[in-house]
Image: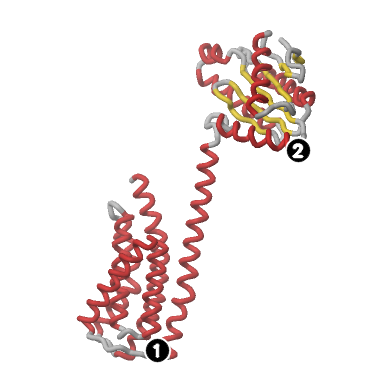
Amino acid sequence: MGRTGGKGLSLVRRLYTSRTLGLVLGLLCVSVAMYPLDPPAWVWALMLFNGLVWPHLAYQWARRSKVPYHAEHRNLLIDAFLGGLWVAAMQFNPLPSATTISMMAMNNVAIGGLRFLLAGSAAQLLGVGVGLVVFAPAFIPATTPAQMYACLPLLMLYPLALGWICFRQAYTLGVQKRELLALSRTDSLTGLLNHGAWKDQLDIEFLRCKGQQKGAAIALIDIDHFKAINDTYGHVAGDIVLRQLSKMLKQNLRMADVAGRYGGDEFCVILPDLPLFNAAQVMEALRERFSFLVYEQNPALKVSLSIGLAALDPAHGDATRWLNDADQALYEAKATGRNRVICCNDDKPRREVLGSV
């Protein structure tokens, strides 16, 4: 049915509830206002049809339509037309008429804003015109106490119901918006932050740690010879390795640490408020545990990690220079034999090495 059909059915279901309640309460309001006028039997039959049958007929009509969204808008215009008809039938009795018009106007604004309010108002005026011809009403300037009390349920309960429906819709849209935002920031294979989202977090952590003069480290992690794994064992095996590494990152890092998939077989971790030495110990433990776990699950699959680490340097002008230091350390880890952790110290030419084949 597509997005339009799904949206239309959702609207139909929401309006079925509000229309059923509103027209039942409206039937009470209109019938009490009409009773002193002693209307003929066909008018009572029309009132009962409008209040008790039409909500269910409108629901089935819209639900079975090819375009439920447009069908429901047609039903709302019919509602407005009938509302105008009853205003004239009640001989413009002030409170019942004002209640009928205002409740329908509120409903039309909630559904379609100003544009649909104008369309509904035009349909109401058409209904009033037809009512003038059919009922030839005289103006009744006073509302009796019974008529006033008959209007109160509609005035009190219908706005509450409509407000609740609008709240639920807004809440659902908010949840969906947050889910879409999370999906747009998440790598679909690993469930970690994607490249762009991780870079955004890097800028945030860089400014925070530098402003608070706290230590921090970045780790860039590369799966050694990952292309050979794909070529030898297939891309399914490669995906399993990627997911396994992402799972280990989620399980073994702190809540404050920020892990992401930087691209391909390369992962990245921000380790805020952690000195370089401690960060190196964390990464070395990850390197050893990952290689052992993969070997334990599949002895034929030999997988190792090369990891480059860089501490936040007060001299870094921006997060890119910090990231570049980690990238240089990773490059050296791969160039000097892989399967190791190399730290970029303040003294750039010197590297601290942890782990080796």
- Kind of residue indicated by mark 2: Gln
Residue 305 screen position, x and y as percent: 66, 17
Q: Please tell me which residue is depicted at 23% across the width and 77% down the height of the picture.
A: 129
Mark 2 neighbour density, 10 Å: few (under 14) some (14–19) many (20 or more):
few
For label 1, the residue is 143
Q: Is residue 255 visible?
A: no
Q: Is residue 17 left or right of residue 164?
A: left
Can residue 145 be seen by looking at this rendering? yes
Q: In the figure, is residue 340 to the left or right of 50?
A: right
Left or right of 193 on screen, residue 31: left
Q: Earlier in the sequence, mark 2 or mark 1?
A: 1
> Where residue 309 sits in the image (x, y, percent)?
71, 21
Q: Secondary structure at mark 1?
A: loop
* Tag 2–tag 1 contact (CB < 8 Å): no
| The quadrant where residue 299 appears | top right
The image quadrant that residue 49 belongs to is bottom left
Mark 2: secondary structure: loop
Q: Position of residue 69 (x, y in %)?
A: 33, 55
Which kind of residue does numbered mark 1 sit on? Thr
Which numbered dot is residue 212? 2
Residue 277 to residue 200: above or below? above
